[in-house]
Image: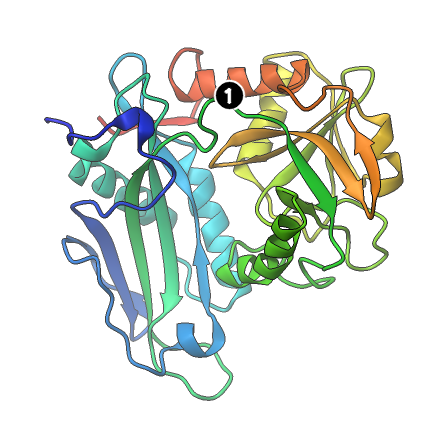
Amino acid sequence: MEKKNLDWENIGFVYRETDKRYVSHYKDGQWDEGALISDSNIVLNECAGIFQYCQEVFEGLKAYTTEDGSIVTFRPDQNAERMMNSAVGLEMPAFPKERFLDAVDQVVRANEAWVPPYGSGASLYIRPYMFASGSVIGVKPADEYQFRVLCTPVGPYFKGGAKPISICVSDFDRAAPRGTGHIKAGLNYAMSMHAGMEAHRKGFDENMFLDPGSRRYVEETGGANFLFVTKDGEVVTPKSDSILPSITRRSLIYVAEHYLGIKVTERPVELAELGDFTECGVCGTAAVVSPVGKVVDHGKEICFPSGMEKMGPVIQKLYDTLTGIQMGRIEAPEGWIRKIK
């Protein structure tokens, strides 16, 4: 199939409407068969549950053209399972795993012309999402829902390479104790936006949110998990029930242990110990790993020895290995790569 005539290396990380998307409706206690459609618009009743009480969950993953010309997705089964868990947390009907995987496959195949070529640095971003479409006025779960999958080609999250970012310790809390911090729902991201814009207005790239109970421990940014590296080369990731279980972080941990022979520890990380680490990064689907050069705690600068010019050596190895697996240059663990074409 002939590719779309785009300047693939300069398309940016923005939404472009593609040819097809998938939709399935939940009504009378069951999901319908679902279908690919051309219309990108959604028509809903003014009293739909998504508008009234924010019942919505979503996922994010990518399709890639690999070195041998195949089109693949990376660990979509993990996205399916996480979305099912998120739905349960918001009293929504879970969309079955196998149907989730099939829907993603259908959308990628139907939009093959939009999948960027190998070597461009771009990928096809896939957004499965589900929301309450049934009308509801009392505070309760809706009776009807829609599951949808859209896709859009995106360029590298960091054009010209991932330069270390600066982060400030936020005065805001991202999630309540025993709340919804572990659920991938739009409401959590909405809660982080004001804090994020406040950080930008102060000249920072991101926030570091602390645990809302004691405000002693590092949790995550508005949309990414933290990784730290000790002087001995050990990778440390914060542990908390409020942190979103990142598939990228889980994958990087496996890569560190099984590909690079690096010890990984998941434990509570105190803000007071940040100065003991040599490297810091934040990880997620969009950027894989973004290096952090410094954290500013109310005027006190905590600078990592890796500096503000480039990734530290350990995080660079993690990034290179995981992207190598995604692009087909390095053999993947069994089940990580789902070949679509």
In this rendering, the answer to whether 100 lies above or below 30 is: above
**Residue 160 left/right relative to 316:** left
The C terminus sits in image quarter? top left
Residue 249 image point, x, y percent: 59, 33
Residue 230 image point, x, y percent: 80, 22
Q: State the residue at coordinates (33%, 47%).
A: 100
Q: State the residue at coordinates (57%, 40%).
A: 246
Look at the numbered disc 1 and give the secondary structure of its residue.
helix
The N terminus sits in image quarter? top left
The residue under label 1 is 322
Residue 250 image point, x, y percent: 59, 33
In this rendering, the answer to whether 161 lies above or below 123 is: above
Residue nearest the observer in this picture, 286 or 49: 286
In this rendering, the answer to whether 332 lies above or below 46 is: above
**Residue 316 left/right relative to 139:** right
In this rendering, the answer to whether 36 lies above or below 68 is: below
At label 1, the amino acid type is Leu
Residue 125 image point, x, y percent: 35, 39
Residue nearest the observer in this picture, 91 or 272: 272
Q: State the residue at coordinates (52%, 54%).
A: 184
Residue at the far bottom: name it: 138
- Quarter of the image holding residue 265? top right
